[in-house]
Image (spheres, rainbow, N blue to C red):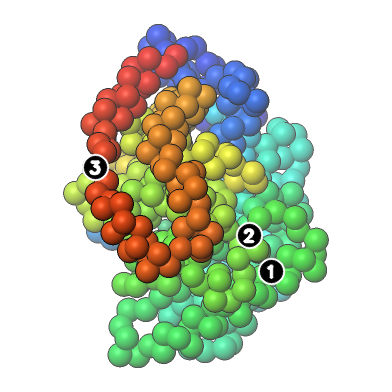
Amino acid sequence: MADFFTAVPEPIPFEGPDSDNPLAFRWYDRDRVVGDKTLAEHLRLAVCYWHSFNWPGNDVFGDGTFDRPWLDPSLDPMAAARTKMAAAFEFVEKLGVPFFSFHDHDMAPYGGSFAEERAALDALTDEALGHMERTGIKLLWGTARLFHHPRYMAGAATNPDPEVFARAAAQVANCLDVTHKLGGANYVMWGGREGYETLLNTDMSRELDQLGRFIHMVVEHKHTIGFEGTLLIEPKPQEPTKHQYDYDSATIYGFLERHDLVDEVKVNIEVNHATLSGHDFAHEIATAVGLGIFGSVDANRGDDRLGWDTDQFPNSVDSMAPAVYEIIRGGGFETGGFMFDTKLRRMSIDRTDLFHGHIGGIDTLARAFLVAHAMWEDRALESLRDDRYAGWSGAEGQAIMRGERSLDDLRDRVTAEDLDPAPVSGAQEALETLVNRYIERVR
Ligand code: XUL
Ligand code: CO
């Protein structure tokens, strides 16, 4: 263990719901067996490298506020990258979660030729491998920063210039290689600038075809190098571009269908991106599960009154439990997990604040999981749902769905029987109260 987070000398313990210790878990008992797995195996928690270690706490109005000495531009970039990495692994180890995630240029500095940047990435990912072997921490996913450098201002895969496309493709080839080297469980593609600012200068259908070609090349490279992780696209409706092509899960499914990629790519759903698209997070999960493309989650939350991606730590069991329920209903994570794509508030400048954010978020997810799992085990919602759709298991319901009834057939039956079914309550308030009862009860 290195010595940056010295105010937290020991790994964070589990002390149970009655503990008042702010540096202890109250709900995340990692070895607790729930159903067929431990909580750690269900949740597959990951810390992100970028917001936690590579972001100085700046915003559009002001400079960084955080104590991140390795971000000092006067330092030797490789030495600074190594210091940052030591602090990152110290943090993840003390927090006691199994995974981390990174972008190529969170870990490796920019600068020099493309080949020199690749060499820096190789050296630093070798160093990461050493930390991973020493600590047992694993990689949930890697991803390439295809939105930060000015060359990508008009997009990467969807850029009007094929040379920018080529540079982005080369960068992804490198990043996929090192994600493979680190044994990553997934590889994520977030199309930060794959969208448009104005239609006046944009050929949208051409750009979407370019994106399709790009993703096919990523799929081919994955198979060439033998990477067995899942490829994930992360939906987001806007920001930084006015319109992003990967708007939401349903839009991505349509894109994957059109480009014959449905068997190769799933989605990484971020809570605050879901809400920016005008959907509930639970809706995005249920959509992806229903379409067979659910992969992983970026756990965070937005702010009701700020219309941008604030990436706050999740803190509401009430809003998280129904979404976690949809994940459990869909069979849980396979290669995915809950990754904290979360930013401290700019005024949270103590080193321990990073622990407080993560501990609160982890306990929120753990408790939401216990609530959702108990509702699932008891079939509390499912038995009601089964009753609600019971008619479709009957002979007529099945005949309709098999395509054995026409409009004419149904008109004849409705006329003959003077069919006038009585409405049945949807019981929303009773169900909401039922969920609250589980939240009160679960221990
Ligand atoms: C940006 C965002 C990214 C992706 C990875 O909104 O969510 O951090 O998760 O590029
Ligand atoms: Co994200």
Residue at the top extreme?
18
Residue type for callout 3:
Ala
Whole-percent x and y of residue 205?
45, 86
Callouts 1 and 3 close, C-beta under 8 Å: no
Residue in view at x 58 percent, y 40 percent:
331
Whole-percent x and y of residue 196?
37, 78
Q: CA distance from mark 1 to mark 2?
A: 8 Å
Query: Of discs 1 and 3, which sits in the foreground?
Result: 3
Mark with earlier residue (1, 3): 1
Q: Residues within 10 Å of mark 1 (few under 14, many from 20)?
A: some
Which label number is shown at residue 219?
Answer: 1
Query: Of discs 2 and 3, which sits in the foreground?
Result: 3
Q: Nearer the viewer, residue 18 or 128?
A: 18
The residue tagged 2 is: 231
Residue type for callout 2:
Leu
- Helix or strand or loop: what does disc 1 sit on? helix
Q: Nearer the viewer, residue 197 or 282?
A: 282
Which label number is shown at residue 422?
Answer: 3
Is 374 situated above or below 156? above
